[in-house]
Image: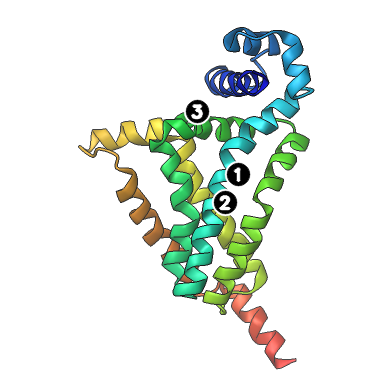
Amino acid sequence: PEADTRGRLLDAAEKLFAANGIGATSLRAVTAEAKANLASIHYHFGSKDALLFEVFARRIKPVNARRLTLLGAVERDTPGDLSAIVRAFVSPALELLSRPEMGGRNVTVLIGRLYTEPMQIRLEILTMFEEVATRFTAAISASLPHLDPVELFWRFHFMVGSMAFPMVAGDIVEARARQIGEVSDVDKNIDRLVRFISGGLAAPATEDDAVSKEDQGED
């Protein structure tokens, strides 16, 4: 069935893109891994860039849907709870690490590889995060009214970076953790990350921004 062929192509592309790199993986290699013919790639996706987009979309869209569901619950039940907002953002992504049926490590490796791709491809994939970024920025802003939009912009992106590094460099982080006798635990690391990010987000505004806000108030 065509749906099975499409799924096999996505599985094969995800595996090979992660293992060998996106640029180093040919469409012929993908079809060989998927036991499909080359025409099937063009039928289902049209191009390699479109295939790459769909590889990301099938993993990222469920994560983002889960984030928005959790955020909706926070806004309904405990509005303004910063730790709960942060947890709603980071936990669906970090849980990928322990869920191979959702792509697991392949997805996190691919996220790292994405930064070597042309800007246009990166921008297209980043559009998948626009609603999440808008909703979470608004929720954090409501919880932390002392932050102006510029400070909030940077802190949101620092949050993303703090979450992304242990995902894309997971093997390195886990190897170093073993050196101190630590066995990586996803749930425990989510708790650590929520505490760390929440503390950073809630810190006093950067001095220049605080002065700027005071100046605006004096006008």
In the image, which disc is placed on residue 23? none
Q: Mark 1 near mark 2, Cβ–Cβ under 8 Å?
A: yes
Q: Is residue 104 visible?
A: no
Question: Where is 23 relative to 55, above or below?
Answer: above
Q: Residue 33 in the image: x percent, y percent?
A: 58, 10
Q: Is residue 213 visible?
A: yes
Circle 2 SS class: helix
Query: Left or right: 31 with respect to 71?
Result: right
Amino acid identity at mark 1: Lys
Check disc 3 and report the residue beneath it.
106
Q: Farthest residue toward the left?
A: 181
Residue 45 against residue 33 in the figure, above or below: below
Residue at 65% x, 9% y: name it: 36
Say above or below: 192 vs 209. Answer: above
Q: CA distance from mark 1 to mark 2?
A: 6 Å
Of marks 2 and 3, the one in the foreground: 2
Three-letter code, disc 3: Asn
Q: Position of residue 107 (x, y in %)?
A: 52, 32
What is the x, y in percent for residue 74? 47, 68
**Among numbered discs 2 and 3, the one appearing first in the sequence:** 2
Position above or below: 121 against 209? above
Circle 3 sits in a helix, a strand or a loop, which is it? helix
Residue at horizontal 55%, vertical 69%? 140
- Seen in the image, is 45 located left or right of residue 62? right
**Residue annotated with mark 2:** 65
Badge 1 element = helix
For disc 1, the marked residue is 61
Q: Mark 3 or 1, which is nearer the eye?
A: 1
Q: Residue at x 50, y 73 (%)?
A: 76
